[in-house]
Amino acid sequence: MSGTSADGVDAAVLDFGVAPAQGYAGLFSQAFAAPLREMVLAANGPLNVEQMAVLDRQLGACYAEVAEAAIRKLGPVDFIALHGQTIRHQPRAVPGFTLQIGSAADVAIATGLTVVHDFRRADVAAGGEGAPLVPPFHQRLFQADQPRLVLNLGGMANLTWIPGADDSQTLQAFDTGPGNVLVDAAVRILTKGEACCDLDGKLGAAGKVQALPLAQWLKHPYFLQSPPKSTGRESFDDRLVGQWWHVWKYSGADFVATLTALTAITVADALRKWTPSAKELLVFGGGAENPTLMRAIQAALPELQVHSGAELSGIPSQALEALAFAWLGEQCLRGKTLPYQQVTGVREPVILGNILPGRNWPELLSRLTDA
């Protein structure tokens, strides 16, 4: 999994021989090399066909390298589920589209393993947003007697409401808006590229939230849009942060503090407006490692118990999405559809993902048939 933060690749191993909550079997993470990261960030702007083809292969080589390293560290696996790197996400265009690149063929050739990839486009083709796709896995992991909320703070922030075990209501989820993406961009501006995130939330903690700019930013049309909805760098990117910084009248620390507050407040507002009640919120993703952001979310939601999902579950924050796509890969291999109507708004259940057979495909297919 590499996400909209564009900081690197997470490879997690999921054991399907046990219940999903006990299936986490290890994590391997690798940062993007600086030139590749710059190419990924530049892909938010216009790309010609040759540039996209080159980036596709370079990402594929990176994913293959990470997969081989993860297998050496964590042991052999049966198949690889590859999310790829989102470079465009416009599900409400006419026609709607979403595009994740990173050559699955390079991964299959390098490892010899079957690769399940391209998870989002079938959902968009069937009228859905193509995101978020992780919520059914959240439900498998975290459903309890009482309703729960799960928040993933990657580049974007996505929120899942999980009904209680005996609840007649259905799973609900959507993107609330930016997670870490705006803060990361601000840090790159302030440090002239020497840092790419607000490590331990120190810069945000040193600043003061400025109410007037924050009120203006909260008028962004995405925050008013009702679910199902999803977003990406098309709406929240470095250019937007650059525009805001250009007219900023306060300190750099205040800028980061106010952007941090924007994430916390938009999560809280969306939760209150569009999800049923719950008593606890489990937070995963890189943003869960930012104590300033976590405090801001708790302050914005005093009625909820806000937990680090990693501390509560034993699953590292950075592993959750990679595990989810491993699970989605298995659903694809078994030809299973999932209940996304209240999540992505898809018209009908569809099987998500494409299968690229590797050298192990005959053996894997035989095992799937026997199972």
Image (spheres, grey):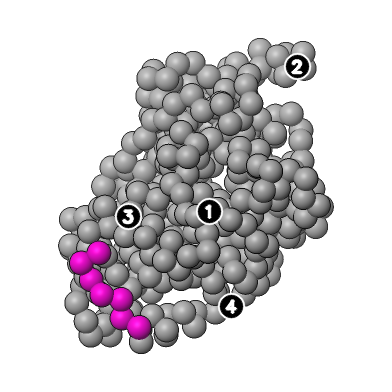
Q: Crowding at label 4, few (<14), some or many (≥20) Cα neighbours within 10 Å?
A: few
Question: Residue beneath label 2, please?
Answer: 371
Magenta residues? 205-211
Residue under label 3: 291
Q: Residues within 10 Å of mark 3 (few under 14, many from 20)?
A: some
Q: Is residue 223 left or right of residue 314?
A: right
| Separation of marks 3 and 2 at Cα, in angstroms | 44 Å
Label 1: state its secondary structure: strand
Question: Which residue is pictured at 59% across the width and 69% down the height?
Answer: 272
Name the element at disc 2: loop
Dot 1 corresponds to which residue?
Answer: 281
Q: Is residue 150 visible?
A: yes
Q: Amino acid at mark 2?
A: Ala
* Percent coordinates x, y for residue 104 in the rendering: 53, 35
Q: Residue at x 37, y 24 (%)?
A: 69
Query: Whole-Å distance between the Cαs marked 3 and 1?
Result: 15 Å
